Image (cartoon, rainbow, N blue to C red):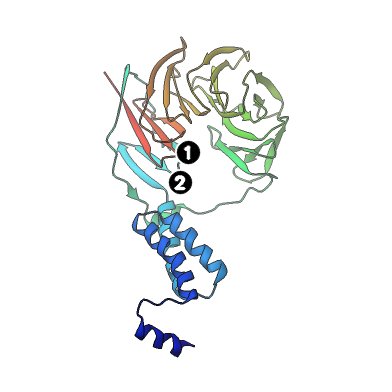
Amino acid sequence: AREDLAAVRRINPDYRDAATLEREAYLRPARAALQAGHYAEARAHLEAWLERHPDDIRFRVLLDKILEHLRQRRLARIWTLGIGLLLLLLGVVYLLWISFQPEPKPMASRFMPTWRPMPTPTPQPISAAWLSKANVQVMRLLEHEGVVTSVAFSPDDRRIASGSHDQTVRVWEVVSGRVSQTLSGHTGAVTSVAFSPDGRQIASGSHDQTVRVWEVVSGRVLQILSGHTGAVTSVAFSPDGRRLASGSYDGKVRVWEVATGQLRHTLRGYKGAVTSVAFSPDSSWLASAGDDWTVGVWKVTNNISLHTLHGHQGAVNSVAFSPDGHRLASAGSDAVVRLWQSVE
């Protein structure tokens, strides 16, 4: 059959049998996607072919190269922003979480009434040596019965809190890895957890539209904060421990008094869900992210919207202040981290 096909092609070089045409139908869009830099799309075309023809060595080799490229893109990247300031970026297609490394001596925030975008810093890829030494799994924590959506270290690094689709919050002892508390009471998936600055309380937000505040040692519920009309997506304590902020699918940010559970402010202005909230180091300002592509900066004490920051080309999934309060980072589904600088 191969000799016959070769003979036909000598007569008509453009001849393609059915098998070749089928193969090229998968390879052509894969090549186009690679040339455009759309590696995930190229991977999908190759995997679809290999499901039908698992012994195709050429496709297998090309797929292995794409998978290695995607693996390299998945590595965390570190951006140097200044003395002691490192920005960690996670994700490939979109960014879900962002955080600043704390400085040895955090300074009070000194906000100015204007924000401007900063130049994009040059990423410094993590070396293989760093990964082999630092990126080591110490233990696996396996008690949850559903997807784990959020984790947080206590201020003294002795405990970890985790929230899950199994509707519980679990508190783990870091040294032993054992569960010291299982906090039950939510009637929906737990989406966000946060420790209070003194480490004595944990806040949790849930799809059941409530925020719960728990006592770490006893595991009892101290407050059940109701008022959101959509799933709660994010919770954050103010650094002074006096306030608790929550964001929700209802497009609102609510600010609560921790001691009494009283609602102090309801911050409006989003056209969609609020996805993340974060306080400035001096507890005076609150940043929030939304799936309407915007970042909000609020004056907590008087419920004033200071700025709405535009620039992302997709939902904004996370916000974080730098330890000195002069910078704000936002990460979005557009696979971009934006840095905002407070200026006079």
Left or right, 317 with reference to 226:
left
The Cα atoms of the two marked residues, 2 and 1, are separated by 8 Å
- What residue occupies the far front of the structure in this picture? 11
Relative to 213, does residue 39 appear above or below in the rendering? below
- Specify the label residue 97 is tagged with: 1
Instruction: Determine which of the numbered discs, if any, sits on residue 282 in the image.
Output: none
Crowding at dot 1, Cα within 10 Å, few <14 / some 14-19 / many 20+, comes out as some
Q: Secondary structure at mark 2?
A: loop
Residue on which the image places disc 2: 91
Residue type indicated by callout 2: Gly
Q: Nearer the viewer, residue 175 or 172?
A: 172
* Residue 175: x %, y % from top left: 60, 45
Residue 1 visible in image: yes
Badge count: 2
Residue at the image point whose x is 59% and y is 17% from the top: 258
Query: Most extreme residue toward the top, as rendered?
Result: 302
The residue closer to the viewer here, 249 or 147, is: 249
SS label for mark 1:
loop
In the image, 23 versus 187, the foreground residue is: 23
Task: Identify the residue at image location x=46%, y=34%.
Answer: 315
| Circles 2 and 1: CB atoms closer than 8 Å | yes
Q: Position of residue 126 (x, y in %)?
A: 37, 52
Q: Residue at x 68, y 21 (%)?
A: 222
| Residue 192, picture quadrant | top right
| Extreme residue in the bottom direction | 3
Query: Which amino acid, by three-letter code, is at mark 1?
Result: Trp
